[in-house]
Amino acid sequence: MQPATSQTNREKLFFCYFMDCQTPQKPGGGKDQTWDIAERAVRGIVELFQERGLIRALGLCSEPEVMARQAKMFRETAEAGAWQALHFQVRGYRPPGASEDYDWERMLTYYEYDEQREDHWEQAFGAFTEDFGACCAHANDYTFPILDDLGFRQSYCSGAGRYNPENGHLWWGAFPHSHHASSKSRLVCGDLELYEFTLTRTLVPEPVGDTGNWMTTDFRAEYERDFGSTMAIAEASVRDMMLRDHPILYVHAPTHNTWDVGNRSSGRRKAIETTIDVAYALAEKLGLELVPASLKDMHDEADRLNAY
């Protein structure tokens, strides 16, 4: 019998952008962040993506505490067309009913299976979502099977190329593009329904001094890169997908709610606008249609193509 191999879509370049909505003052957040800044960040990025006709591409990925505090605003953004996800930053998180926070110094990478499963991610959001993201690529070989078991269909957890054991980044050799996650190893394509979306980033890890650590550069506004540097990251990633015959072509970028996106003179605001301009320019350069898409939209297309 002829095998049912994966097909490819070479008509569209999918564009997806999300904001990690973190609790002010927690590890990983901005040291000067306030709840007011967190709200202005969300409202500012929603306004920008509405203006550019890209609201379907925008995801707001919230920690449980943020969702509980700003639930009305996130319901409004969902009604406007932005997709929603549970973003989990285990350091400092306090589960419902608990008397104290989790260990602020111990990231999710180092939690055993039972510890991860007991976090009750599906209850933490207050309403079920099919999308999940892990802060700073904190995940291990238990994470994907647990997410799949809980009913999540899409995730962004991996950090292909990152290797920094002290900070829980153990992704050397990970598959660099979207794929069905594995129940056996976080580093390879696998058998789960859960579809993992890696971020757009540089493909070749670079050493961090003489520390023994390696990092790639994400396609994100926080770096405030110019058009040429931003284009170089996106184009290299998409061309690598094309060389691999990857099923779908996409650009997937992150930012955070730690600064006022509504401030149009901000360097980071301009960097988000540059990211959008790059996505359109890259699609034109490659003869593709730029399509704003949620993680679900891209997963549905990948499944239509029988993607690995």
Image (spheres, grey):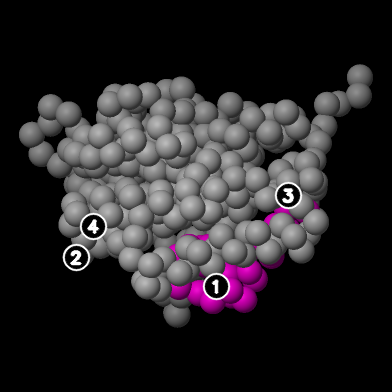
Residue plotted at (33% across, 24% down)? 127
Judge depth for marks 4 and 1 and give the one in front: 4
| Residue annotated with mark 2 | 32
Badge 3 is on which residue? 289
Q: In terms of sequence position, does the residue under pointer 3 or pointer 2 come before the other?
A: 2
Q: Is residue 181 rendered to the left or right of residue 45?
A: right
Please tell me whether mark 3 sits on a helix, a strand or a loop: strand
Whether label 1 touches label 2, CB < 8 Å = no
Label 1 crowd bin: few (<14), some (14–19), many (20+), radius 10 Å = some
Residue type at numbered disc 2: Asp
Who comes first in sequence, dot 4 or dot 2? 2
Bounds of the magenta segment: 216-242
Label 4–label 2 contact, CB within 8 A:
yes
Give the side of residue 278 with respect to residue 108, left or right: right
Residue at 78 percent of width and 59 percent of height: 286
Neighbour class for label 4 at 10 Å: few (<14), some, many (≥20)?
A: some
For mark 4, what is the residue?
37
**Would you say residue 235 sits in the magenta stretch?**
yes
Report helix, strand or loop for mark 1.
strand
